[in-house]
């Protein structure tokens, strides 16, 4: 074997990996921006769609001046707060914590609709309640968007076959859900 042939083979084998490495280094900032813009990415059991949706929901909630989630009331009387119950649940069953946190939103919205004499049957009726209360100024603008975002995230948790979130993400969802439920509860208490 000739030394030139060995060098040529060595260069040939390294050509594509080096080319890719150079391209990644040159375009690292645009690639980083493109990756953060990805709506859904799955590698094995790793999925970033829930995280992105949760981040958007958190951003929407910032402008709504929601009460802290610790003030949410329980659907039934228990010795611990719903906040503590859901945080405990999130550490072992994050999917269940998301599902149960959503129940607080639904119950608080139904209570608010009942206090206003509005009937609710189904998703469209609940959105109509939110629309009316937002137009009347009882709920801040953006409440319906946050409600929809949290509902979509809850639907992922319930219906997605491969769905895996961390307990930290579940806790963030619980915070948002209980804050929104608290806002609905305080609005229904204002009508008394």
Image: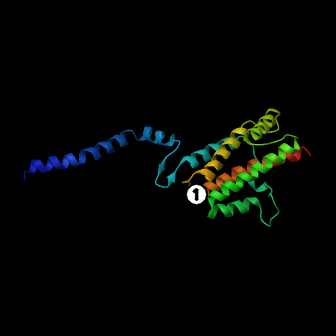
Q: Is residue 101 visible?
A: yes
Q: In terms of secondary structure, where does tag 1 sit?
A: loop
Q: Residue at x 72, y 39 (%)?
A: 144
Among the 4 quarters of the image, the one containing residue 165: bottom right
Left or right of residue 176: residue 110? right
Q: Nearer the viewer, residue 121 or 1?
A: 121
Among the 4 quarters of the image, the one containing residue 120: top right
In the displayed structure, 60 sits above or below 164; it is: above
Left or right of residue 188: residue 2? left
In the displayed structure, 59 sits above or below 84; it is: above
Q: Seen from this angle, which residue lies furthest bottom? A: 79
Q: Nearer the viewer, residue 22 or 94?
A: 94
Among the 4 quarters of the image, the one containing residue 137: top right
Total marks shown come to 1
Q: Residue at x 71, y 43 (%)?
A: 147
Location of residue 33 in the rendering, given as x and y in whole percent from the top left corner? 48, 39
Q: Seen from this angle, which residue lies furthest left? A: 2
Q: Nearer the viewer, residue 192 or 28?
A: 192
Pointer 1 residue: 166
Location of residue 97 in the rendering, given as x and y in whole percent from the top left corner? 67, 58
Location of residue 57 in the rendering, given as x and y in whole percent from the top left corner? 65, 44
Q: Seen from this angle, which residue lies furthest top? A: 135
Dot 1 crowding, Cα within 10 Å, few <14, some 14–19, many 20+: some
Location of residue 47 in the rendering, given as x and y in whole percent from the top left corner? 52, 51
Q: Residue at x 76, y 56 (%)?
A: 70
């Amino acid at each position: 074997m000739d030394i030139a042939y060995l060098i040529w083979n060595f260069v040939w084998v390294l050509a594509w990996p080096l080319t890719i490495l150079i391209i990644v280094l040159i375009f690292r900032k645009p690639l980083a921006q493109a990756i953060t813009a990805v709506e859904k990415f799955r590698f094995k059991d790793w999925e970033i769609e829930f995280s992105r949706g949760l981040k958007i929901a958190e951003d929407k909630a910032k402008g709504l001046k929601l009460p802290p989630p610790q003030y949410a009331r329980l659907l039934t009387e228990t010795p611990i707060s719903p906040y503590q119950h859901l945080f405990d649940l999130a550490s072992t069953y994050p999917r269940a914590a998301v599902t149960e946190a959503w129940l607080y939103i639904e119950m608080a919205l139904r209570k608010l609709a009942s206090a206003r004499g509005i009937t609710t049957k189904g998703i469209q009726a609940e959105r109509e309640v939110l629309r009316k209360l937002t137009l009347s100024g009882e709920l801040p603008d953006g409440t319906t968007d946050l409600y929809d975002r949290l509902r979509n995230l809850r639907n992922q948790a319930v219906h997605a076959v491969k769905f895996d979130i961390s307990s930290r993400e579940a806790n963030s969802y619980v915070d948002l859900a209980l804050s929104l439920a608290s806002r609905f509860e305080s609005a229904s208490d204002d009508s008394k």
